[in-house]
Image (cartoon, rainbow, N blue to C red):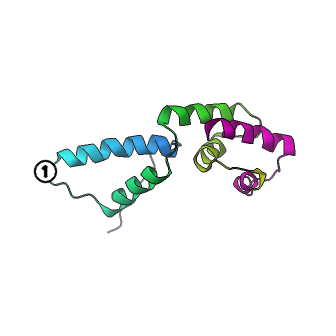
Amino acid sequence: MTIFKEKVDEEYLTTAETKEILERLEAERAAEEEREMRYELARAIEHVNKFADLDPEESREFVAELLELDKVDEKTAYKIADLQPGDRDELRAIYAQERFSLSGDELDDILNVVKKYV
């Protein structure tokens, strides 16, 4: 017997937004009598607690500001918000799979937005 799962919907979330969702899920699980948490969920909570530097509202503002720039699509904006590159080389690594490269000014425009939130 094979079970197939269908992807119904998809949306991007920052680590901070994910942390907020997982905190609610963790609180719901704590209220249940059978409190055992799956390994994957516990690891995900540990990860977001370690890496979520901003609060969810700040992270949404960060992404929105990045989306106002040329050559920053939604997927890339979320990557930048989560990874918070500190220099041109780190930012270039995010764009490594793209079929275009950014000019120095375009890189600096993105890094200036990152500096506001780091």
Can residue 9 be seen? no
Give the structural element (helix, strand or loop) at label 1. loop
Q: Residue at 70%, 30% (x, y): give it.
A: 68
**Camera-side residue of 96 and 46:** 46
- Neighbor class of circle 1 (other Cα within 10 Å; few <14, some 14-19, many 20+) is few
On-image quarter of the C terminus: top right
Say if 32 sits above or below 42 in the image: above
Magenta run includes residue 75: no
Along the horizontal axis of the image, is 10 left or right of 72? left
Query: Where residue 30 sits: x, y (%)?
Result: 21, 48
Along the horizontal axis of the image, is 73 left or right of 25? right
**Camera-side residue of 57 and 2:** 57
Q: Residue at 42%, 45% (x, y): give it.
A: 19
Query: Where residue 34 sits: x, y (%)?
Result: 15, 54
Q: Residue at 67%, 36% (x, y): give it.
A: 66
User: In the image as oriented, which residue stretches furthest toward the bottom?
Assistant: 1
Q: How many marks?
A: 1
In the picture, residue 61 is in which quadrant?
A: top right
Query: Where residue 76 sits: x, y (%)?
Result: 66, 45
Q: Residue at 54%, 33% (x, y): give it.
A: 58
In the picture, residue 38 is in which quadrant?
A: bottom left
The magenta segment: 90-118
Examine the residues drawn in magenta and state their main secondary structure: helix
In the picture, residue 93 is in which quadrant?
A: bottom right
Circle 1: residue type = Glu
Magenta run includes residue 117: yes
On-image quarter of the N terminus: bottom left
The residue at which mark 1 appears reads as 33
**Camera-side residue of 105 and 2:** 105
Query: Where residue 110 sits: x, y (%)?
Result: 74, 40
